[in-house]
Image (cartoon, helix red, strand yellow):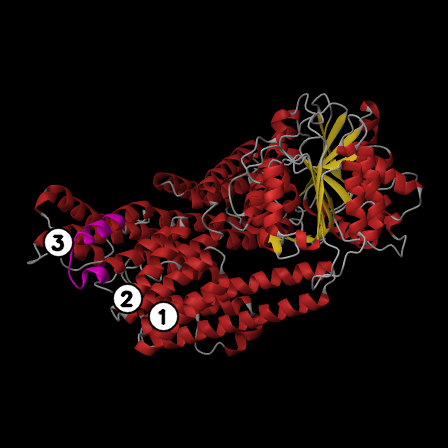
């Protein structure tokens, strides 16, 4: 067994705590926040319970039906399911539609309590079908109550987009029936749905409405649930605001940074006040509501220690006596699990997790049992008791596999990989990491298009798994196969990032590493890999040979250097970029110079990682020459790179541009000259100002079959698809709208030029929109600007580029290189020529 350095283990453990708490967020969501409305048991229409659980089935109640309800109330859901399923199968022809509906309703509630959401959905759908066969004043309300549960279950099952229409109809029915309690509950579930789909402002409004109606009804349980969920959404929105502020800081936009920091602080304070109100309301109630409210408040205060002084009499020690009096249920199991996230007493955490596993096992809830066992394994991992940690983790894996709980399975596979690494079992660690990645890929294909939260937070939760696997593959004198596996893993991560960025799973591409042989003649593909503490450069030579080199600088220092370089490179008033450019050249290119000299490539294709995506590799300087003076330079996200011959179609350009001021953007006076120059060199049609409308852009691109599309307008590629746009005369065209324009093209666009746009320098996802446009649509290459330069200064390079592109068999890579060299020879500052980069997957 390998011995560990105690200090190193301590440092690693602190990182693991952060990663694990981020990674377990879905458990926390599924355990309490989502279950608050509609999923937990009570008899009848309880605000803490299943809206559709029915106490009676016909009259009189026979012994078996009463026994099933007793089993359900006691948390013995498997026994209740067995009875209800038997009654359903025994003689369904003798059961009325109402009796069938009640049986299906109860089965839906019991299956949901057992963690079998798909089964619950099936039975609630059937219950609704049976209720639709009935007439009577109460039928619509009975159906509406089942619909609330169904909408909640869809939300948990990654089918969130199905829920809002259902809930809005429920609200309409409940209002017409003057059932204000059902209105409050439906708004509460709707708030959860909006939260899951990332529509946080709508979520806040819906949950505030739920709390307000509950207050008017003096319905304390429903109000408490709404407040706790509202606190969660405010916390999530505060995190989003904080990320926007961080990006603005990196961009030097101090005004925006201050505004979003203010919003983040306001939401944090509001969340704490909301959690505190919920906790105060439950002090005299006891039960699971008081437990969950207390845990939520303590968690919020723990994350904001400056407010711990006003904690009052709320403490974790109050929680456990309350839990002892709560019957076994999914809520109890998750309350025990969630308590461990704020508990500093390790032995008590272990006891809570063991108890949670027993409660889950007793209630037949294998998904929750898996979480309890997995977190228990993590707790032993943090203690350094790796053998015990591995045993508990393997048990969690087995239980997850029994119930096909892939949303927890990948976590435990990842965890097993980490533990095996500590134990010195390198190959088995790699095998477990690969299993975790495979599970993740399977999950994303199923749910990525439905729910923003269920798509996972790639940066915090998913990315470390891929990067730690890559580190394992490259850390010990990797073989060709090991380097190949690392590139495949990197491509899978980039695919995942791209899907996360666009919010769908439409990108299903063959990884570039699978085409390692004979892909791009006279071209070397250079992949950079930025891991937590180190980085690598990987070459793929024209003959398919792979070579890897470590970057001789820690990742944090490298990222700082990149940001500094980008900042000074944009400033035409200084030549301070020289020293930083040479330093980056020495780190990234100097170690591979001999390999490049041996094959003498014409082009270098960079498949960059992290913040390296946001700088122009063409501007790296060896002390005598810029890199672009030696090679043609292009960038790619890394999928399906292939050599491409110029099209034989007639060279025609579609040109759209803005010259007028459209607040907050200034006029682009040079665009008129740029548009006419492109038109003169490439032909086609020009549409300026009032002719540059969204409708006109759609019609011209989709119906006219232009080979080149040139857009000279303000635009920004931000950290998400929502912060990415192009400015037309009549509206901002966001990325989903632009993608819709590019869909179903009759002929591929060989070159899409986006002039006068900019990317967010401090965010490593900001160029994903640019790259995604190419790989997701019928666009071969994108020529775009990393930062905004005076539009008049861009005209000369654009003219040179299209002039060189007119030459026979000219490629965009070669044309851009010649244009940039022309500007270099004329003494132009790199800010005026290196901002243009070529992205795509055909060169």
Q: CA distance from mark 1 to mark 2?
A: 28 Å
Question: At 17% from the left edge and 60% from the top edge, which residue is drawn?
Answer: 55
Q: Is 600 or 385 nearer to us in this picture?
A: 600
Residue occupying the far left of the picture: 60
- Does residue 800 appear to the left or right of 289 in the view shown? right
Give x and y (percent) for residue 750. 68, 34
- Does residue 685 appear to the left or right of 278 in the view shown? right
Mark 2: which secondary structure?
Answer: helix
Q: Earlier in the sequence, mark 3 or mark 1?
A: 3
Q: Earlier in the sequence, mark 1 or mark 2?
A: 2
Magenta segment: does it hold 820? no
The residue under label 1 is 290
The quadrant the N terminus occupies is: top right
From which residue to which does the magenta span run? Answer: 125-142
Front: mark 1 or 2: 2
Q: Is 246 or 603 nearer to us in this picture?
A: 603
Q: In this view of the protein, can residue 595 be seen by the observer?
A: yes
* Mark 3, other Cα within 10 Å: few <14 / some 14–19 / many ≥20: many
Q: CA distance from mark 3 to mark 2?
A: 29 Å
Q: CA distance from mark 3 to mark 1?
A: 31 Å
Mark 1: which secondary structure?
Answer: helix
Question: At 85% from the left edge and 45% from the top edge, which residue is drawn?
Answer: 796
Tell me the tag on residue 475: none
The residue under label 2 is 174
* Mark 2, other Cα within 10 Å: few <14 / some 14–19 / many ≥20: many
Give x and y (percent) for residue 97. 14, 51
The residue under label 3 is 65
Give x and y (percent) for residue 396. 41, 44
The part of the image, by quadrant, that contains residue 265 is: bottom right
Q: Is 198 or 805 nearer to us in this picture?
A: 805
Magenta segment: does it hold 133? yes
- Compared with residue 313, is residue 60 higher up or lower down, i.e. above or below? above
């Amino acid at each position: 067994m390998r011995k560990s350095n105690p200090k190193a283990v301590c440092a690693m453990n602190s990182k693991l705590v952060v990663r694990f708490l981020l990674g377990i967020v879905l458990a926390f969501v599924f355990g309490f926040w989502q279950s608050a409305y509609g999923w937990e048991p009570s008899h009848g229409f309880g605000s803490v319970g299943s809206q559709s659980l029915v106490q009676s089935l016909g009259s009189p109640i026979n012994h078996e039906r009463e026994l099933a309800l007793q089993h359900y109330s006691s948390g013995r859901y498997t026994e209740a399911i067995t009875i209800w399923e038997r009654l359903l199968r025994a003689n369904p022809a003798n059961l009325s539609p109402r009796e069938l509906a009640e049986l299906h309703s109860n089965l839906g509630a019991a299956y949901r309590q057992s963690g079998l959401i798909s089964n619950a959905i099936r039975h609630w759908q059937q219950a609704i079908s049976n209720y639709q066969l009935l007439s009577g004043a109460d039928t619509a309300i009975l159906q509406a109550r089942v619909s609330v549960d169904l909408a909640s279950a869809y939300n948990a099952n990654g089918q969130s987009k199905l829920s809002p229409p259902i809930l809005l109809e429920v609200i309409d029915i409940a209002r017409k029936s003057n059932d204000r309690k059902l209105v409050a509950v439906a708004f509460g579930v709707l708030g959860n749905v909006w939260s899951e789909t990332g529509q946080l402002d709508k979520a806040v409004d819906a949950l505030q409405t739920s709390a307000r109606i509950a207050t008017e009804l003096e319905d304390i349980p429903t109000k408490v649930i709404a407040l706790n969920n509202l606190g969660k959404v405010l916390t999530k929105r505060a995190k989003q605001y904080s990320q926007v502020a961080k990006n603005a800081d990196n961009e030097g936009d101090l005004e925006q940074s201050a505004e979003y920091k203010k919003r983040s602080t306001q939401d944090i304070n509001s969340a704490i006040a909301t959690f505190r109100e919920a906790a105060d309301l439950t002090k005299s109630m006891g039960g699971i509501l008081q437990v969950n409210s207390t845990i939520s408040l303590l968690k919020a205060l723990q994350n904001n220690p400056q407010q711990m002084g006003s904690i009052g009499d709320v403490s974790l020690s109050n929680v456990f006596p309350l839990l002892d009096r709560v019957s076994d249920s999914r809520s109890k199991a998750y309350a025990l699990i969630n308590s461990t996230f704020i508990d500093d007493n390790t032995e008590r955490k272990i006891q809570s997790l063991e108890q949670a596993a027993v409660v889950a096992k007793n209630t037949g809830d294998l998904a929750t049992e898996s979480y309890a066992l997995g977190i228990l394994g993590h707790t032993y991992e943090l203690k350094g008791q790796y053998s015990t940690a591995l045993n508990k983790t393997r048990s969690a894996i087995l239980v997850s596999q029994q119930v096909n709980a892939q949303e927890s399975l990948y976590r435990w596979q990842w965890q097993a990989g980490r533990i095996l690494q500590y134990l010195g079992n390198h190959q088995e660690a790699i095998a477990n990491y690969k299993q975790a990645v495979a599970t993740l890929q399977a999950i994303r294909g199923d749910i990525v298009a439905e729910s923003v939260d269920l798509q996972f937070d790639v940066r915090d939760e998913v990315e470390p798994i891929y990067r730690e696997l890559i580190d394992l593959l490259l850390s010990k004198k990797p073989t060709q196969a090991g380097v190949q596996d690392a590139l495949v893993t990197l491509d899978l991560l980039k695919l995942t990032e791209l899907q996360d960025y666009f919010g769908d799973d439409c990108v299903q591409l063959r990884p570039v590493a699978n085409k390692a042989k004979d892909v791009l003649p006279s071209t070397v593909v250079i992949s950079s890999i930025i891991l937590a503490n180190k980085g690598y450069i990987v070459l793929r030579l024209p003959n398919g040979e792979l070579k890897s080199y470590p970057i001789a600088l820690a990742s944090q220092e490298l990222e700082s250097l990149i940001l500094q370089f980008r900042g000074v490179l944009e400033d035409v008033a200084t030549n301070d970029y020289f020293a930083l450019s040479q330093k980056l050249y020495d780190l990234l290119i100097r170690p591979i110079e001999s390999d490049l000299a041996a094959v003498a490539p014409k082009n270098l294709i960079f498949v960059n990682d992290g913040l390296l995506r946001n700088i122009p590799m063409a501007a790296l300087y060896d002390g005598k020459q810029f890199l672009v003076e030696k090679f043609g330079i292009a960038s790619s996200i890394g999928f399906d790179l292939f050599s491409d011959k110029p099209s034989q179609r007639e060279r025609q350009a579609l040109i759209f541009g803005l010259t007028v001021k459209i607040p907050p953007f200034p006029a682009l006076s040079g665009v008129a000259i740029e548009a006419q120059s492109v038109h003169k060199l490439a032909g086609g049609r020009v549409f300026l100002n009032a002719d540059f409308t969204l409708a006109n852009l759609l019609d011209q691109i989709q119906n006219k079959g232009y080979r080149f599309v040139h857009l000279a307008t303000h635009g920004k590629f931000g950290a998400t698809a929502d912060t990415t746009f192009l400015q037309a005369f009549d509206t901002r065209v966001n990325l989903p709208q632009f993608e819709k324009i590019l869909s179903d093209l009759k002929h591929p666009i060989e070159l899409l030029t986006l002039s006068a746009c900019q990317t967010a320098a401090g965010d490593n996802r900001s160029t994903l929109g640019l790259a995604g446009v190419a790989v997701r649509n019928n666009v071969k290459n994108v020529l775009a600007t990393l930062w905004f330069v005076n539009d008049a200064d861009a005209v000369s390079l654009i003219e040179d580029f299209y002039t060189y592109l007119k030459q026979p068999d000219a490629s965009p890579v070669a044309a851009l290189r010649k244009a940039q060299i022309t500007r270099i020879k004329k003494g132009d500052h790199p800010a005026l020529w290196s901002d243009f980069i070529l992205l795509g997957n055909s060169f």
